[in-house]
Amino acid sequence: MVSIVTINYNGQADTCEMIESLAQHENYPYEIIVVDNASRGNDAEIIQNKHPEVTVISSPENLGFAGGCNLGTRQAKGDYILYLNNDILIDGPFLKALVDRIDSNPKIGLVSGKILFEHHRDIIQYAGYSEMKMIRIKSHPFGAGEIDKGQYDKACPTGSAHGACMLTSREVINKAGLMTEIYFLFYEEIDWSLQIRRAGYEIWFEPAAHIYHKEGMSINKGTPLRNYYLARNRVLFSRRNNKGLFRFASCLYLTAIAYPINVVRSLLSAYWSNIKAISKGQWEGLTMRKDCEL
């Protein structure tokens, strides 16, 4: 059985639509665990009343993406755990393809499917990532924005999984550990991908499992909040995953080059509030508690 863990934050309509989409199209054995991350309304009650077959966990505080996923994982009963965004829809079975891929080789520890945009179902969002450039903290998303013509329909290892859809096994979690909860938002799945690789596993892209992503329903692009977490967590990621001179070089690059570039871009766009958010994120990324490092 696959335990599907999804996070709800003020998005009960999307969560219920996702649950209904799975009920209509998926035939592989699964359970759904919804972690409500302290939504402002009565989302948890609405979801539970509409879908009594689903396990709903109400967190008294917003634990962030990783914290919510970890809370749901502790309640999961399946041999496999799938972390699935609540703004995902499907038009056919996809779980078996993910399970078959992770079972095909004991070295595979984490699998993501092909992710297409819900509003343009022929446009790719994710077909794998390049290896992370550990000084610049940059990776290239394969296929992003391209029309899906089957050009990425071959399963292969990838630099990291995509947090909207990633399947692992209980055995891998027992060996590699749960996600770190220091990020709250963004970079969690990239960090966890490296954590799983350090435990001796590979990360794979499986195009036979395709899903549709509404994208950005919980936090809008270009907002100060988004830019704050992106700036902060990029530095935190470097501090956690680089050592010695690599860590110094990366933090220097992010502070002396990447940060000024982002500030100038905000100035040119007249996004004054973003400058403050980026600056705050950059500073906190550099000064956050020492135990954020591995």
Image (cartoon, helix red, strand yellow):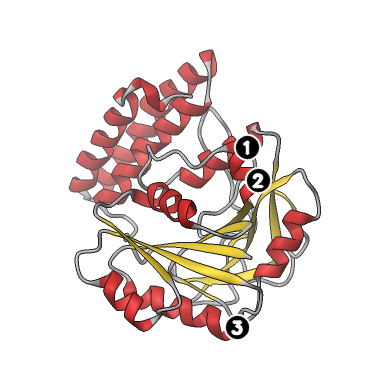
How far from the left and from the top, in percent, is residue 65? 39, 51
Residue that numbered label 3 is attached to: 25
Residue that numbered label 2 is attached to: 171
Which of the two discs, 3 and 1, labels the residue nearer the N terminus? 3
User: Is 152 placed left or right of 133 in the picture?
Assistant: right
How far from the left and from the top, in percent, is residue 127? 64, 59
> Which quadrant of the figure contains the N terminus?
bottom right
Which residue is located at x 55 percent, y 54 percent?
162
- Contact between marks 2 and 1 (CB within 8 A): the answer is yes
How far from the left and from the top, in percent, is residue 182? 37, 37
**Which marked residue is nearer to the observer: mark 3 or mark 1?**
1
Residue type pointed to by label 1:
Lys
Q: Secondary structure at mark 3?
A: helix
Which residue is located at x 29 percent, y 78 percent?
46
How far from the left and from the top, in percent, is residue 45? 27, 74
From mark 3 to mark 1, how far is it between C-alphas? Answer: 33 Å
